[in-house]
Image: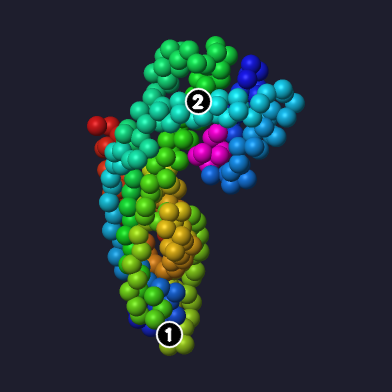
Amino acid sequence: MDQPKLFSSLLGFLLKREYENDESLSSLDSLKEMIFSEVDISMESIESMYIKCLNFIKNSIASDYNLSTFESIVKENKEFTDMQQECLIKFWKLNKKKIHEIIYKKTRFNNSLSKMSWRIDLKTKTKDIEEINEAVSIVELKLSNSINSSNSNKLIRFEMDRAQLENTLQNINNIQKHLQATNTN
Amino acid sequence: MNKINNFNLGKLIDFQWKLGVAVSNSYTKELNTPFISVFLKVLDSNNQIESHSFELTVPEFQNFAQQFKDMSSLMESL
């Protein structure tokens, strides 16, 4: 645990296992195999350091520490060596934003939009109409739900003519205006 | 107009939205994350109305918005 590379790898493992749901890392034994295979250290020491880091990160997430607060809290914590404190600060600097987003998505109970595809068609002729020149946009939205798997991978397909597309775009522009107003307030 | 849409894949009939802020959750008391909920009603090819909803983060919404803008400018050029 006195090599920055190994300690940072432990933090990287923690991020993947606890927050990025990497299922291949479900057992802590893989931590020893992957990171500490060439080091003489017991599984108990690895586990205890892992849990110490995990609790520290969990508390930092719970209070959503900004970098400077994180830095002062980590430096007050004498359970970590100077080198480990530096690694933790670097880890928080690099991953805070990503972890915050993951934490938000963990309680997104509604569906998320996993993919959006679209196509523009020009209708030129139908059985009943000899000549038309109607542009339509066809949209396919793929929804997923990581919490409620029965809702996962729902496909929505619809067409919009020019007027409908403009109307939807108007709604979207309104949302953007509100977002900008919220950001400037 | 109805004849033109005889073979539609589905028709968007309603688009509603809500802008909100997720304040806290079970992991953090300081979540403070804006989100956009979208609620769509689509008339499917069997003339049945289906409702769908999903939630977007701000970056996800910006991407969603950009695709509609791209569609719109292409439609205008036709």
* B16 left or right, relative to A144: left
* A172 left or right, relative to A56: left
Q: Is residue A53 shown above or below A149? A: above
Which badge, 1 or 2, comes first in the chain's sequence?
A: 2
Residue A83, percent from left and from top: 58, 14
The residue drawn where x is 68% and y is 23% is A41
Crowd around label 2: few <14 · some 14–19 · many ≥20 (10 Å): some
User: Most extreme residue toward the right, as rendered?
Assistant: A38
Please give the residue where the numbered disc 1 appears in the rendered image. Answer: A129
Q: Describe the element under mark 2 as helix, strand or loop.
A: helix
Q: Can residue B56 be seen in this view?
A: yes
Amino acid type, label 2: Lys
Whole-angstrom CA distance, mark 1 to mark 2, is 72 Å
The residue drawn where x is 34% and y is 45% is B35
- Output the chain of dot 1: A
Magenta span contains residue A77: no
Q: What stretch is highlighted in magenta?
A: A14-20
Q: Which numbered circle lies on residue A100? A: none
Q: Describe the element under mark 1 as helix, strand or loop.
A: loop
The residue drawn where x is 53% and y is 41% is A20
Please give the residue where the numbered disc 2 appears in the rendered image. Answer: A52
* A96 left or right, relative to B32: right
* Total numbered badges shown on the rendered structure: 2
The residue drawn where x is 46% and y is 54% is A146
Q: Is residue B15 shown above or below A131? A: above
Our reading of the magenta stretch's main secondary structure is: helix
Q: Can residue A161 be seen in this view?
A: no
- Output the chain of dot 2: A
Amino acid type, label 1: Ile
Residue A1, percent from left and from top: 63, 20
Q: In which quarter of the image is residue B29?
A: top left
